[in-house]
Structures are given as structure tokens and as C-alpha cells.
Image: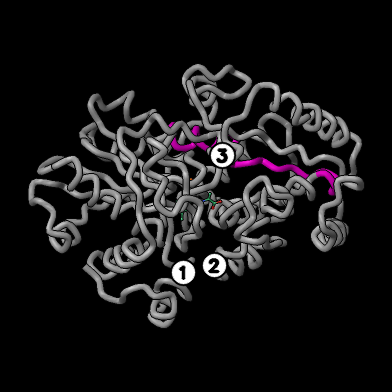
Amino acid sequence: MPTEVSAVERAMSGYEQEVHKVAAKTEAQVQPTYAEMKAIADKVFAMPYDEAVEGVLPFYPYDGMDKFEDKPAEMGGPKEHSASMPRRERPATIANSALDFVNNTPLIRVDRLRAALKLPEKIELLTKCEMYNAGGSVKDRIAMRMIEEAEASGQIKPGDVLIEPTSGNTGCGLCMAAAIKGYKVIITMPLKMSGEKLNMMKGLGAEIYRTPTEAGWRDTNSHIALAIRLQKAIPCAHVLDQYKNMGNPMAHYDWTGDEIVEQCGGKLDYMVVSAGTGGTITGIAKKLKEKIPGVQIIGVDPQGSILAVPDNLNDEDRLKAYAVEGIGYDFIPSVLDRSVADKWVKTKDAESFKMARTIIKREGIMCGGSCGSAMVGAVKAIEQLGITEGRVCVLLADSTRNYMSKFLDDAWMEKSGFPLDTF
Ligand code: P1T
């Protein structure tokens, strides 16, 4: 599996040269109409990738992140970003757009759930409820951040085409921001992801192309490969690329992390976060560790994925398919610093969906499947570490809206072989 990438391979990938060529070309390019964009995209999608016609695909050599604090200014280290993009408060009166309701999500104590799970009374269980972002997930934050940073640096302007490979939530956030700001959007998304996300993004005006779920990230038919092919073929098209865009972890370092510190009054013992791109856990962990001495970070990774450390945690069902959406990968995204977690926990589908249904039923918090995984991760960490007291915060990444026809539907649960009972 190509997770370790040498400097030589990085140079040979031609990625940097390709980016510069594209940037130079963009200067002279005319923005396509929606119909022109769609015609090109349909053609590329219908055509199997052919190296002789399209050239070598310049895959970015994702290889995880280290030394976040030391990132050079051009990569966007924390100092440069914090100064440039403060968090805007939610308006209490008339707002200008739905984007005013990205960030500043509630932190809710879930003591009914704690009791149902039979966790010690001295544990104060909290949830950071990201479904209350305007587009329904934690990924609204990074979508807005990546777009506004690209606008500020002159990389993109309204009328351009934004192409993003996504499991759907970054897509919904991007499509929402793009609808408001006037960009065209193309989404590439594996077939596993829900029809609810697909229809949401269509409703927001995007074109969606589905790719085989089983394609590895570097396969030429993966959602990442298709985004690269489309970007090469369409004028004024950009892949902001959540897997390597520093706006992703920075949104959580500057915003989500700060919110948690403020809402907790600086008192927190454990923070539990599930990982996909890893931007959320990386950004939050860096901020919390700066502001709250002694706080421990728990990373949650689904069985089948290979993000957890040490690597032997990933042995059971390594690279096998799983049903929970949005978390886990077969490569290490460049926005993920796996060392920020003091402990990694693995989770399974059945327990995750059971837990998500429990959170909904016990607390009235309408959360998604990865929220169930995060809560299962919290319970496992509490057991494994022998935690008997203290404040534990679990990040709930998205909304049940995305899964009305999946884990919320009894028929789907039964057909998929998952239990209907709750805790
Ligand atoms: O990407 P990250 O910051 O690690 O967040 C993980 C995550 C957790 N839960 C859900 C439901 C998610 O959708 C995600 C990440 N989602 C994407 C990567 C995406 O493209 O929508």
C-alpha cells in the first residue's frame, strides 16, 4: 500500500510542475458556461482513463503530516492563518446568508446517555454538536475556510469550477458556500455514500459523479483520480483538496478548537474525535493541547481503515469494506498528524449504528453514523483506560438527515444484518 512516499517519488510525480502549468493556463482561460462544463465532465466520466490520451495522473503523494507548528508560511502555519481569519459570531439579528451559521455550534451535556451506557456518575459526558452547522456537518467549516482562503489568495473567483473528491459532507458544505458565492461545483463521490447526500448536493446545484467504492485512492477510477482528470480537462477548474489543504486543520485549530476551550471554560480531560481526512482531530488536538495542559486526545478509526496507530490495531479486517460513512481511509491524508492522539480506538459498524440510534433516542440529538462510532470509541477508551471521573467531550460530526434511508430505517438495518435494539 503506497502510504510511505519518498522524496524521489514526490519529485517524480510531477505534481508541482503540473500545478504550475495549470495555474499558468488558468490565467488565459475563459470560464466555461454550466452547459460547457457539464459536457466536458460527462465526456471525461464516460471515457475510461487512457494514459496515452490524458498523460500521467499527477496524484499528490499524501503521506500524513508532521510538525504542524513548523509548517512554512507558504504552507500556512498556525500563526499566519490565525491572524488572517478570525471566527465570526452567529448574528443575533438579521443575517446576510446561511454561511453566518457555520461555526459556533452547541456543546451539550448528555447525562441521559451516560446513565443508559452505565458509565460512572463522576464522568461528565459532553457532545460537540456539529450537525447544527448550516449545511449539517463539521465539514461546513473547512469548506468555507478553503474557499475563503483561495479567494483571499486570488486562486479562485466566482464563476470558476470547484471540483472536490468527498464522502459527501465536505461536498454539501462546498455546494452550500458555492451556491451563495456563485461558483460551479463538480463532486466526485464513491458509490457507498448515501443518496441523501447526493440529492442534497444536486439540490444545491452541483454535478455529481459516482466512483466504485472498492477503488483504492490511487486507482485510476477512484474519486480522487476522477477529480484530477476533470480538473485537467475543464477550464478555470480547481481542486481545493481537503486531503492536503491546510485550511482544513486550520479551521479546527482556529475555530472548533477555540470554541471547545471557551465552552468548557478551559476544563476538559478527554476529547474524542473520529478521523477521515483527519483535519478535525489534528486541528482540535493542537489547539486543546496548547490551551488545556494534560488534556488527552482519543482518535477513532473504523475497522477496515488503516489510520490508527500503532498499525497492528488495523490488522483485523484490514482494508475490508465497512458501512459507516465519512471516516477511515486506505491512505494517510496530508492534513492528519496521527501523533496528536494519545490513544487510537477501532470501531465496528453494528455497534456504531446501534450507538447512533441510542444517542437519537436518549438525547434527541439527530446525529449520523460516525457520531455513533465516536461515542463507541469514547466508551471503549473509558473502559480500556479505567477512567472513573472527569470531563469527556465527543465530537458528533453530522446529521441523521444524511441517513434517513440507511441506519435510521429499520428495514435497511435488518437487511444489512445490524441489530435494532438500543442501549
Ligand atoms: O475529515 P475529518 O475532519 O477527519 O472528519 C471526519 C468525518 C467524520 N464524520 C463524518 C460523517 C464525515 O463526513 C467526516 C469527513 N467527511 C469527509 C471527508 C467528506 O468528504 O465529507
Left or right: where 52 falls relative to 101 = right
Tell me the residue that label 2 is attached to: 194
Q: Residue lying farthest left?
A: 121
Residue 234 among magenta residues: yes
Give the x, y percent position of residue 316. Answer: 39, 51
Choose top left, top right, bottom left or bottom right for residue 232.
top right
Tell me the residue that label 3 is attached to: 145
x 57%, y 57%: residue: 168
Instruction: Give the mark nearest the N terminus, 1 or 3.
Output: 3
x 50%, y 60%: residue: 321
Q: Is mark 1 within 8 Å of ligand 1?
A: no
Q: Quadrant of the C terminus?
A: bottom left
Tell me if residue 101 can be seen. Answer: no
Real-space Cα separation, disc 2 to disc 1, in angstroms: 7 Å
Q: Are marks 2 and 1 in contact (CB under 8 Å)?
A: yes
Tell me the residue that label 1 is attached to: 403
Q: Nearer the viewer, residue 204 or 282?
A: 282
Discs 3/2, front: 2
Residue 41 among magenta residues: no
Instruction: Give the mark nearest the N terminus, 2 or 1.
Output: 2
Give the x, y percent position of residue 285. Answer: 37, 33
Choose top left, top right, bottom left or bottom right for residue 131.
bottom left
Three-letter residue code for mark 1: Tyr
Real-space Cα separation, disc 1 to disc 3, in angstroms: 26 Å
Instruction: Give the mark nearest the N terminus, 3 or 2.
Output: 3
Q: Is mark 3 within 8 Å of ligand 1?
A: no
Left or right: where 137 falls relative to 382 = right
Residue span colored magenta: 232-253
Tell me if residue 157 can be seen. Answer: yes
Q: Secondary structure at mark 1?
A: helix
Number of residues whose C-alpha sits closer than 10 Å to that of mark 1, classed few (under 14), some (14–19) or many (20 or more): many
